[in-house]
Amino acid sequence: MKNTAIFSRLIIILFFLLSANANSQDREFSPHEERVLQAYLAYYGRPADPDGLAYWAGRLEDEGGDLSTIIDAFGESQEYQDRYGSLSNSQLVTNLYDQLFGREPDEGGLAFYVDKLDAGDWNLQKISLVILDGVQGEDVNIVDNRLTFSKYYVENIENGSVASLESDALLVLISGIDEDYQSVEAAIARINLEEAQDFPLPELLSPGEIQAEFGLWSGDVENDPIWDYHAVDLDGDGDDDVIVLSGTGPWEEFEGGRYGVILLNNGDYTFTPAAGDRPFSAHPREYLTADFDNNGMLDVFIADHGWDAGSFPGFQNQLLLQTPEGFVDVTERLPPDPSGFTHNAAVGDLDGDGDIDICVANNGGGGGGIVTPYFLINDGAANFIRTTEPVPQQILDDYTLWPWAVDLADLDGDGFTDFIVGASARGSGESRVYWGSEDGVFVDDAVTLLSAPESHTVWGATEVIVTLVTDLNGDGLEDLILGAYDTGIVGTYPLRGIQLLINEGNRTFSDQTRRRMGDSAYSLDQGWQVGYRLFDFNGDGTIDIVPQFYDPANNGIIAWLNDGTGHYAALEVDHFDDAEATFRLATGVYVLVDDDFKALEFSDWDGLLGVNGASVVSGAIITLPD
């Protein structure tokens, strides 16, 4: 017997993501802002606060960029008097060197600057500029690293990701940064750890028990090699059905489409193939279900980018309408896409007419004739017209903003559909929410930039590949879960990361990932997760975040278990000895039946479609909030 499903899945994961690479950049600081940040480091030994940065950068701009014209006023503060007012001239100069370079001055330099102070020729502000502008050797790396940390701190104060720290705490953090960039990462981690300390995380008391299950079902079902599978209740009977998709990989000579199958759950984890037409795909990237033709039955849209190599020929997305007699392939109703390179898609009522429209997220790096993201507008009977009119102009103009993950949802409760655009690895790490309006057109200036995740700063690049909309903290506002992988560490298996963005109202979001997940949210050595499902994994009545489709040998998280307040304890692969069970939890699809679930691994067994699985025998136990 053979297990082509899992082999194909792991090959897909490895090939597709190891071929990706990208550059990134953080929030852009103006030259005047950079100069003021340097002055803060030299004179106060800490990053600027956002208000102080804005004020002094404005003053500097008014003076034509000459810091010497404002440095005297810059140094006349109560903070300076309190901290340094009682120091001798020798101590003052030594302190400047320590704040900039983390070392003492050489004897000649110290004597020179002390003489200037003693004679009244220069004041300390002037000396700080001379030292700053004369930096050389290893001191350059130290100043650059301290400046990098300063930018991170300012940016994350501005977007609400971290709380502002007292000057003494900042001095300690800066003093620990040297020429090694890992010292910057450590300082960033300490900021986020301090931010998380006021929000104690639940602890895992018992991992519970899991078990593998073999031969759950098999059927003589016509199918091509298994590429992917997804669970959703298609027939509305309360249990999940499974869409099994096929495809072709660059390791094969064949580059066309292959047939999958839709399996309807009999309610006991056995299946009956759905009647009618079957899925047909080459490299399926997303499946969506919605009632596109308003007949009360869920239909299926499959986003496909085709053979992922060579000339990248693309492939037609597919539309299957569900009828009482079975599924009907009406792909001809989709307007032609000249490139057919769709990485992701989303559904929602864009124009407020009661019909479900589709956002098609093409992404190909702006080359090879790949067309921009676009929308398919539904006439109510599953006939579509293609248009780019709703797409923000800045996305149409800048391929570095083309996303690999999108979503459509009303996040601000105004009755209009909003557009969630995941960060591209070619950009700054910031995802976006474009706010909807009555005309269903998204514009550049009605946008909220979401803070880049902590992992982006560490990794150097972030590609958001999953977007989920849900109320994480029970306040009635829709929050965001963004799943991402790293593309910035060359030669390393793509790393996993997740971001939790809490809706604060007024079209603002705060990144509360660390305070709700701790340091389990991203990894420097564990591989990526293709997606997540939200359900009660351990049977305690709360909705957990459960990764799907990952390599258990290179990934640690089975589930993030919710304590009921939207704070999570990590249940990990290493908590269990049953490798057969953890393998199927990692590579199977979670199928829910009433209050039960199993992770099902679909495989091609000598021409038969078969199912092995894994289930939870007893649920994990975590601490609950007081």
Image: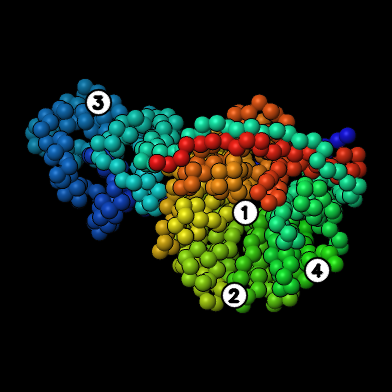
Mark 1 / mark 3, whichever is N-terminal: 3
The residue carrying mark 2 is 351
Disc nearest the viewer among 3 and 4 = 4
The residue carrying mark 4 is 323
- Label 3 amino acid? Pro
In three-dimensional space, the C-alpha distance between marks 4 and 1, rounded to whole angstroms, equals 31 Å
In three-dimensional space, the C-alpha distance between marks 2 and 4, rounded to whole angstroms, equals 26 Å
- SS at mark 4? strand
Mark 3 / mark 2, whichever is N-terminal: 3
Residue at far top of view: 107
Disc nearest the viewer among 4 and 1 = 4
On residue 105, the disc is: 3
- Label 1 amino acid? Trp
Mark 3 / mark 4, whichever is N-terminal: 3
Can you give x and y, in whole percent of width and height, for residue 158 in the image? Answer: 36, 52
Residue at image location 80% in from the left, 68% down from the top = 323
Q: Left or right: 590 with respect to 22?
A: right
The residue carrying mark 1 is 404
- Label 2 amino acid? Asp
Q: Residues within 10 Å of mark 1 (few under 14, many from 20)?
A: many
Mark 4 / mark 1, whichever is N-terminal: 4
- Label 4 amino acid? Thr
Can you give x and y, in whole percent of width and height, for residue 484 in the image? Answer: 57, 46
Residue at image location 54% in from the left, 36% down from the top = 621
Residue at image location 65% in from the left, 74% down from the top = 355
